[in-house]
Amino acid sequence: MKFFIDSADVKEIETAAALGIADGVTTNPTLLAKVPGTPEEIYRSICNIIDGPVCAEAVSLDADDIVAEGMNLAKIHDNIVIKIPATKDGLMAVNTLEKEGIKTNVTLIFSPMQALLAAKAGASFVCPFVGRLDDAGHVGMELIEQILQIYENYGFTTEIIVASIRSILHVQNAALIGAHIATIPLSVVEKLVKHPLTDAGIQSFLKDWDKVQDR
Ligand code: E4P
């Protein structure tokens, strides 16, 4: 299973890289707004840290404009993947960009049919948002199961990035059902490693180690 880091914060991405768990990065305009620097500077810095896909979101709405924006973003670095919302114009742009050899990630996916269309349009990745579905009273992880089943039925190679992850259980369930990738905020990555019994075990071992030193 691949882990992407869902962040535009270079320090967070450095930490994830040092942990050896970062296979790629997803950003979006909201994440960019939280950190200093121009989008281009941020993407360049991230690409210098991570040797894997770095998703940069196109904000145009018209197909031709998305293609032009995507082509410009792709010039920043070979690892840039163009994140494009799941709309009719977005899928047209995906089709064009992928034919030009530029990888795309169809984002803001909330239904299995959006994911099927994205795969048919040639997307390299799709981003179904589980947390936002849970927030709206649905079971986000069911969408991941449905997309996995549909892609398996027809042999699509589009990779599923489980996105909008809020909890340890989101990551665990994504792994259990075999999602290809989870894009995870660093705060959740840090929770994945923590266990109170590990902390208690360290404390009791250190106490007993002191006794051995007094001998
Ligand atoms: C993924 O690529 C998205 O940018 C991200 O996971 C959205 O998460 P949110 O619902 O917490 O904003």
Image (cartoon, grey):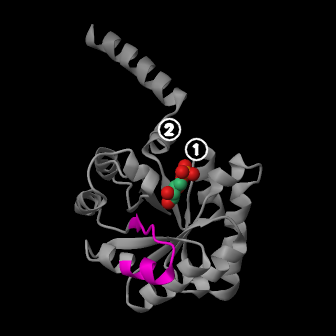
- Confirm or deny contact between disc 1 and disc 2 (CB under 8 A): yes
Q: Residue 184 in the image: x percent, y percent?
A: 49, 52
Q: Report which quarter residue 34 is drawn in.
A: top left
**Dot 1: few (<14), some (14–19), or many (≥20) neighbours within 10 Å?**
some
- Compared with 32, 190 (above or below) is above
**The disc label shown at residue 168, or none:** 1
Q: Residue 33 in the image: x percent, y percent?
A: 39, 48
Is 177 on the left or on the right of 78, as rendered? right
Q: Residue 78 in the image: x percent, y percent?
A: 28, 76
Numbered circles on residues, count: 2
State the residue in front, 122 or 142: 122
Q: Residue 92 in the image: x percent, y percent?
A: 54, 85
**The disc label shown at residue 191, or none:** 2
- Compared with 130, 76 (above or below) is below
Is 124 on the left or on the right of 143, as rendered? left
Q: Amino acid at mark 2?
A: Lys
Q: Earlier in the sequence, mark 1 or mark 2?
A: 1
Give, as a single range, the part of the protein colored magenta: 55-68
Q: Amino acid at mark 1?
A: Ile
Is 71 on the left or on the right of 188, as rendered? left
